[in-house]
Image (cartoon, coloured by chain):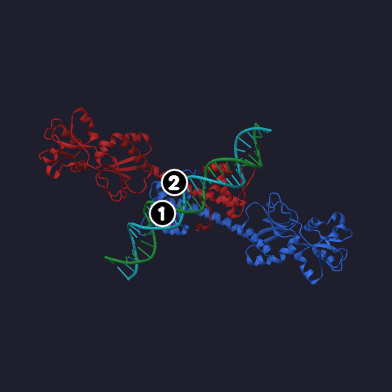
Chain colours: A blue, B red, C green, D cyan
DNA sequence: TTTCAGATGTAAGTTGTGCTAACAAATGGC
DNA sequence: GCCATTTGTTAGCACAACTTACATCTGAAA
């Protein structure tokens, strides 16, 4: 196709609108511009073709024969284009948002809050993919990931989501340690971790607990970890949001809460633009995380 | 059709070109722009749709699935539009140029020169319609008219073509008048006119000859008029171009040459844009008339 | 008839899209 | 290794497209 001798697409679209509505004013309304703009486009086209395409007929415009021929082609062409665009858009909004996240974050932060998003956007399906590995987002069809770390994932875009909100908790009767300083130094503590909860170990290391020397027990789920800790069997690093009720009721006590600079949950996305549904979800995430 | 949520047509066209050529550079060449322009359009589209449409693959771009779908629709749409435009253009160039003109101008000015246009544009057919009346140009399918007058035709566009180039001529032996002053005052001159040559009478009146009082003989063709004048039977107003050979050879003498301010041949067109062939002819007319 | 609403016609001035220029970086053939 | 060719990205400019403003025309209602 040679675009050199095809007039401005804007002018052709204007003429198409004139042909559809039968008047300059109507076309102007359809295109959301003034009638003057449409009139100028029409005159430009006529100059380009060297032939009148429409003539005034009372109030309104009627097409010449040449105008009719052109309008027929333009109508089909633009309709096809609009159809393609519309279908692509429709497909996107229907596509579910796929979010990869750590099991801990899903359990302790997202699940208690996600109802708000469902009620706000009942038409947007959210599919949560719990997991630890940062696999290829594009290959796995994942729109965004929520990961724990220092905020640096090469080739990806990361924005901090929640501050660092872990605590070392134990049952009130657990008396082997009373401060953070004790935790790292002393052997003999019994640490419990859920198998999937890598972020707690990261945080622990960052604040000074060396699990290579201290040792830790790994359980299948965080529920089992909690039971063990409530029973006074040892220590655990838990998300504040998850243990707040226990702390309030006195079932657990917090031995340490604190920052490990930069460490926290991040929203990780590809540099590519997000799908509309994913954009909605991200906006909701930011708002809820900020208001926390 | 609602154009509000259809992205810029230029961007869509750029993406169409990318889809066709399989590369940004190729698309840029096809559209006669730089690769940067195409790249920006593509990114704009992807942001608009919130979905990647193409990804880099070595040297070149391959479309995503969404990109394929969109490209299919755009390809059809733009092809249809280009087809309509091309057909309209093709129809025009084939159309002959219809020129209405006075018989005198045709005979004495245009016919000796028109060969130049034929050789320059062998593909453009020129149809000459001799006649005097200024009928409705559009109704009669006339592209342009060459008329004699003062340059004012209401509702039409007129541009001066040739200066006023008439002369009062007579045979050398015709001695009844020697100056313009004589011509108007004296009765008894024998004036000859071709029936179709209204412009000579207009010019004559404008320079001071009152044919109502002087009287004139009307002949069927200008050839007959010339014969009569050459035979010394009387006076005639003739186009300079036509009688120059006679004047040079001494067969005729010029009694007066002069301006009748504003009076002359004009190229008269509708305000509408001209068909391409007609534009070519007009350009040629102007050049030849100016170089005269 | 006059009047009015709504249409087109056109000039002049403004604005934002779309482009270029210029550089960086990656790829593939030599 | 080099070199040609591609894509990526930014800053800045030009002009197409638009608005504003006013004039003119049409058709219907008063």
Whole-percent x and y of residue A266? 71, 57
Q: Is residue A125 above or below residue B23?
A: below
Residue A39: numbered disc: 1
Quarter of the view holding residue B125: top left
**Is residue A217 visible to the viewer in this orientation of the structure?**
no
**How many residues crowd mark 1 within 10 Å: few (<14), some (14–19), many (20+)?**
many
Q: Is residue A285 above or below residue B112?
A: below
**How many residues crowd mark 2 within 10 Å: few (<14), some (14–19), many (20+)?**
some
Q: Nearer the viewer, mark 2 or mark 1?
A: 1
Assign a secondary structure to mark 1.
Answer: helix
Q: CA distance from mark 2 to mark 1?
A: 23 Å
Pointer 1 indicates a residue of which chain?
A
**What residue does disc 2 label?**
B87
User: Is A192 positioned to the left or the right of A141 in the image?
Assistant: right
Q: Quadrant of the C terminus of chain A?
A: bottom right
Q: Is residue A177 above or below residue B180?
A: below
**Residue situated furthest bottom in the rendering:** A249
Out of A285 and A254, give the one closest to the viewer: A254
**Residue situated furthest top in the rendering:** B249
Pointer 2 indicates a residue of which chain?
B
**Residue situated furthest right in the rendering:** A188
Quarter of the view holding residue A84: bottom right
**Is residue A44 visible to the viewer in this orientation of the structure?**
yes
Whole-percent x and y of residue A134? 73, 53
User: Is A68 positioned to the left or the right of A172 in the image?
Assistant: left
């Amino acid at each position: 196709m040679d675009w050199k001798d095809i007039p401005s697409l804007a002018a052709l679209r204007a003429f198409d609108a004139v042909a559809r509505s039968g008047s300059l004013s109507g076309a102007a309304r359809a295109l959301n511009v003034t009638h003057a703009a449409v009139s100028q486009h029409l005159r430009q086209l006529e100059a380009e073709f060297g032939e009148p395409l429409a003539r005034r007929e009372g109030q309104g415009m009627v097409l010449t024969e040449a105008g009719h021929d052109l309008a027929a082609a333009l109508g089909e062409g633009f309709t096809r284009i609009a159809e393609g665009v519309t279908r692509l858009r429709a497909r996107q909004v229907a596509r579910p948002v796929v979010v990869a996240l750590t099991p801990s974050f899903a359990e302790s932060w997202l699940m208690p809050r996600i109802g708000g998003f469902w009620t706000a956007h009942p038409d947007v399906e959210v599919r949560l993919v719990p997991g630890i590995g940062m696999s290829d987002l594009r290959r796995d069809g994942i729109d965004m990931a929520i990961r724990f770390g220092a905020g640096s994932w090469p080739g990806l875009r990361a924005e901090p989501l929640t501050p660092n909100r872990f605590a070392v908790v134990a049952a009130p009767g657990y008396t082997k340690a009373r401060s953070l300083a004790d935790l790292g130094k002393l052997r003999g503590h019994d640490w419990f971790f859920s198998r999937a909860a890598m972020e707690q170990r990261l945080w622990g290391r960052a604040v000074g607990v060396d699990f290579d020397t201290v040792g830790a027990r790994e359980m299948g789920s965080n529920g089992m970890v909690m039971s063990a800790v409530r029973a006074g069997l040892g220590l655990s690093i838990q998300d504040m949001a998850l243990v707040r009720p226990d702390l309030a009721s006195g079932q657990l006590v917090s031995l340490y809460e604190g920052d490990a600079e930069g460490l926290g949950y991040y929203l990780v996305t590809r540099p590519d633009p997000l799908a509309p549904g994913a954009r909605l979800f991200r906006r909701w995430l930011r708002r809820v995380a900020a208001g926390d």
